[in-house]
Image: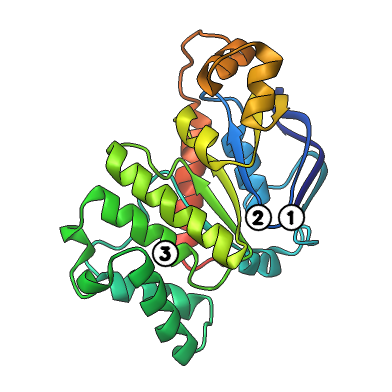
Amino acid sequence: MIRVSNLVKNYGDFQAVRDISFDVDEGEIFAFLGPNGAGKTTTIKILTTLLKPTSGAVELDGLDPSVQHNEARKRFGIVFQDPSLDDELTAYENMDFHGVLYKVPRKIRRERIESLLKLFELWDRRNDPVKQYSGGMKRRLEIARGLLHTPKILFLDEPTLGLDPQTRNQLWTHVKKLNEDERVTVFMTTHYMEEAERVAHRIAIIDHGKIVAQGTAQQLKEQTGGETLEQAFLALTGSTIRDEDASSVDQMRSMARMFRRGRS
């Protein structure tokens, strides 16, 4: 479903992504982990049509996202780190507006909105302004919205950041159910190692722009001698505190703004 081959991205003299390769199978939950500034954001931006690679190749469901922008965007949904809902609209209105942008027929749109809002336990609050929602409810709504146009791939960029453990657990339960029931391929990033260990079928760890390890959580633990995925992660990437990559933050914010303007 996703194929990345010898991907390189340079910003002037700085190489943000350094010749990385990986595949994600259809129906797989794939975790892409790394410290701040490791190259995750740049890779996601290339995968989601908003940045062209310096060299290498990327495929989404057989399409080149750097060339076939519109067709590729129909294939995926995305939930950003930063909130992208309209707080003044209701949950239903946010969903409906998204469906209109993706040209989902009205009848299908209504049925899909009801189904997803019920799945994410938001149907009873569908007519409430989103500004009245808790952080966890907003995150559930964003994921529901990202699935409205029935994408084959769902990108989740740190979707549980700042949520309490109960809400995080509930959110991943819903995602796993969708993955199993609808065979949605999930590409996720998170800094919560226990989430990746619990949810992901396979994991790739990127550091300083290069993939340093790939495999199941168990394989990564065996490779490093760690008892937990967090110990394996630290063994592979070190324990030095990293500063947030300012350029990556700016890229993700511009990415969210572009999608809110109508995915042009």
Where residue 71 sits in the image (x, y, percent)? 69, 69
Q: Earlier in the sequence, mark 2 or mark 1?
A: 2
Residue, x 39% and y 59% (percent of image)? Answer: 142
Q: Is residue 24 above or below residue 244?
A: below
Q: Is residue 34 above or below residue 71?
A: above
The C terminus sits in image quarter: bottom right
Where residue 189 sits in the image (x, y, percent)? 53, 38
Question: Label 2 belongs to which residue?
Answer: 49
Where residue 154 sits in the image (x, y, percent)? 56, 56
Viewer-proximal residue, 105 or 27? 27
**How far apart are labels 2 and 3 at the CA level?**
21 Å
Question: Label 3 belongs to which residue?
Answer: 144
**How far apart are labels 2 and 1 at the CA level?**
6 Å
Q: Amino acid at mark 3?
A: Ala
Asked whether the viewer can see residue 208, the reply is no
Name which quarter of the figure residue 204 lies in. Answer: top right
Name which quarter of the figure residue 238 lies in. Answer: top right
Mark drawn on residue 66: 1
Left or right of 124 on screen, residue 160: right
Q: Secondary structure at mark 3?
A: helix
Bin the neighbour count of mark 2 within 10 Å (Cα to Cα): few under 14, some 14-19, many 20 and up.
some
Q: Earlier in the sequence, mark 2 or mark 3?
A: 2
Q: Are marks 2 and 1 in contact (CB under 8 Å)?
A: yes
The N terminus sits in image quarter: bottom right
Q: Amino acid at mark 1?
A: Ser
